Image (tube, rainbow, N blue to C red):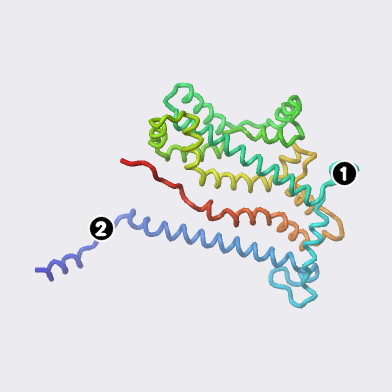
Amino acid sequence: MENATKKHYKRYKPPFTWRTVTRKIFPVAVWSLLLIWTIVFLAQLLWGLVTSVKSAWGFYIDPIFFPKGKEMWQFSNYAAAFKNIRVQITNTETAGFFRMLVNSLLFAVGNAFLSVLTAALASYILAKYNRIRWVGALWAIVLITNYLPISSSTAANIKLLNDLGLFDSMLGNWLWSCGAFGAVFLMYYASWKGLSWGYAEAAFIDGAGHFRTMWQIMLPMTRTIFGVLFLMQFITLWNDYMTPLIYLPSFPTLSYGAWLLQYTTNYETADITVKIAGLLLIAFPVFVLFMCFKEKLMGSLTIGGLKG
């Protein structure tokens, strides 16, 4: 009897469906694309590192592979790039590497932190208190402003900052970044929707108010989301040279210095190898930031505390 049952199960085959096929093919396709993208990215990074330490003659002889011969290596490219990354602010004032580094940190860290924080607070209200009528109306306004194309606002922003005395001011730029809405708002809104409201109800029973519940209980539970969004905003702002150029002309950043470096005609920085060394030098702080916080940013939400 047992042998007959085993033969029956061996002869049985599950019916063919496209769903089972896609379930097997889709993960393989996604991981294959990610692997190809990673290989291409690492290849470009390796090429940049190798090119940045080549001499100009070594690059023209072989622009792809490692230099051949000691005379083809030139580690002084980084020193030349560091020396010549400068921005002319006025006729008598220039900004060097360290000054632009400080401006970049103030611009990227301050704007990223405030934009994510205000988005977290605004999305919390709309996600957890959506039964209130005016909150529902505010959600409709948010969707309209996010998806309705509104252009030509730069001149109006400059005039507003000028009238408030906040133009060409780092503090004014920080306040201007507290828009609360946009892509960061939508991503944080989705994270709030996935977080159980039972934590807040338990806090209300223990006597906590709405603000204390949000600040001490709910917001710390999304610290991973906050960190990831902050890092994304930081990298975007670190590479943004147009916004400081328009709104902070007295605070040039390293990204603006890198943009000017590619057009310089100085004999020390005219070679492509020096320009690539300068770009890698500017990208180095972002790499250090990611390596320091990658373990925390790659973690997941800590769920616990509810007893059913």
Instruction: For mark 2, give the secondary structure.
Output: loop
Q: Left or right: 160 with respect to 265?
A: left
Q: Spatial distance from mark 2 to mark 1, Cα to Cα?
A: 76 Å
The residue closer to the viewer here, 252 or 213, is: 213
Q: What x and y, as percent, mark residue 230?
A: 59, 44
Q: What x and y, as percent, mark residue 66?
A: 70, 72
Q: Residue at x 65, y 53 (%)?
A: 286
Identified by mark 1, the residue type is Glu
- In the image as oriented, which residue stretches furthest toward the left? 1
- Mark whose residue sits in front, 2 or 1: 1
Q: What x and y, as percent, mark residue 23?
A: 37, 56
Q: Left or right: 23 with respect to 75?
A: left
Q: Which residue is mark 1?
A: 93
Please tell me which of labels 2 and 1 falls first in the chain: 2
Q: Left or right: 307 with respect to 75?
A: left
* Residues packed near mark 1 inside 10 Å, few (<14), some (14 to 19) or many (20 plus): few
The residue closer to the viewer here, 192 or 268, is: 192
Q: Residue at x 65, y 65 (%)?
A: 46
- In the image as oriented, which residue stretches furthest toward the top? 133
Quarter of the image with the C terminus is: top left
Q: Residue at x 44, y 28 (%)?
A: 130
Q: How many marks?
A: 2
Instruction: For mark 1, give the secondary structure.
Output: loop
Q: Tell me, for residue 15, which label it has, or none.
A: 2
Q: What x and y, as percent, mark residue 96?
A: 81, 50
Report which quarter residue 28 is drawn in: bottom left
Identified by mark 2, the residue type is Pro
